[in-house]
Image (cartoon, rainbow, N blue to C red):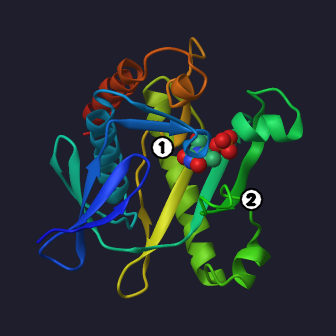
Amino acid sequence: MEKLIYEGKAKQMWSTDDPEVLRVVYMDQATALNGKKKDQIRGKGEVNNEISSLIFEYLTAKGLKTHFIKKLSATEELVKKVEIVPLEMVTRNVSAGHFASRFGIEEGRKFTSPVEETYYKSDELDDPFINESQSLALKLVTKDELDVMWKLSRQVNQLLTALFKKMGLALIDFKLEFGRLADGQIVLADEFSPDNCRLWDLKTKAHMDKDVYRRDLGELTPVYEEVLRRLKEALKEEA
Ligand code: TMP
C-alpha cells in the first residue's frame, strides 16, 4: 500500500510499488515567511506541476542528471527516490529579495558574475545561511558533492537564463535542491517553478513569480499560467 512519506509546504511524497520510485503530489497551497503566511490557491498545484515537469524534461534533454521520471497526471509526477541534501542552493543574477534587504541595496542591480549562497534546510532554525566549511563540519555534504551541485546549478542557470529570455523573462534568482540516488550519485531534485525562482517581465518589469503572493501584488494562478503559456511556446520553437 502507498504510504505518505513526507508532506512539505506545497507537495506530498508518496511511496509506490517500486522502492526506488516516489509519487509527488502538487498541492494548491502557497506559503511565505517560512510558513507564517499560508493560503489555499486554486489551480496552483496543477500549473506548478506542468511548469516543473516541462523544465525538468528540458534539463534532462540537455544532459543534466535529475530525479524526474515523468508527469503522471495534472497534479502528480513520478520521481526517483533520493536522500535530499539538506542545503538550499541559491543563485542570484540580479539583486532582489533578501540579498537587497540584507545589504541595503536596491533591487535590480545586475551582478558581474552570479552570487552563490547556501542555506541549511531546517524549519526549526528558519533555514539559516551556511557557508562551505560549516556545511562540511556538520557533514551535511562532501566537498566533491558540493562541487557537483554547483556545477549543475551553473548549467541550470545558463540553460534557463537563455530559455526564459526567449519567453520575455529575466531569471533574477532561483533555489535548487539536490539528492543522492541509492548509488550515491548527486541529481537535481525538488521542483523548478515560479515558487522557487524570480522572473521579471523584460518589458514591463512585472513580477511573474511567488513575489506576487509574498508581496500581495494580485492573483497568483493567472500569472503562473502566463509563464506556462510562454514556456510552451518557447519549447515549441526549440523543437
Ligand atoms: P531570497 O531573496 O528570499 O533569499 O530568495 C532567493 C531565491 O530563492 C528566490 O528565487 C526564492 C528562492 N527561495 C526558495 O525557493 N525557498 C526559500 O525558502 C527561500 C528563502 C528562497
**Residue type at numbered disc 1:** Leu
- Tell which circle, 1 or 2, labels the residue nearer the N-terminal end: 2
**Residue type at numbered disc 2:** Phe
Q: Which residue is mark 1?
A: 160
Q: Quadrant of residue 201?
A: top right
Residue found at the far right of this picture: 104
Q: Quadrant of residue 216?
A: top right
Residue 110 visible here: yes
Picture coordinates of residue 152, whole percent (x, y): 52, 63
Check residue 129 in the rendering and tell me which mark sits there, or answer none. Answer: 2
Picture coordinates of residue 60, whole percent (x, y): 33, 59
Mark 1, Cα crowd under 10 Å, few <14 / some 14-19 / many 20+, is some
Picture coordinates of residue 189, whole percent (x, y): 41, 62
- The residue that appears at 51% across and 43% down in the rendered structure is 196
Disc 2 residue lies near ligand 1 with CB under 8 A:
no
**Residue situated in front as seen by the camera: 170 or 194:** 194
Residue found at the far bottom of this picture: 183
- Is residue 225 shown left or right of residue 142? left
Disc 1 is placed on an element classified as: helix
- Is residue 86 shown left or right of residue 138? left
Disc 2 is placed on an element classified as: loop
Mark 2, Cα crowd under 10 Å, few <14 / some 14-19 / many 20+, is few
Position above or below: 57 against 183: above
**Dividing the image into 4 quarters, which one contains the C terminus?**
top left
- The residue that appears at 26% across and 36% down in the rendered structure is 46
Mark 1–mark 2 Cα distance, whole angstroms, equals 25 Å
- The residue that appears at 75% across and 84% down in the rendered structure is 137
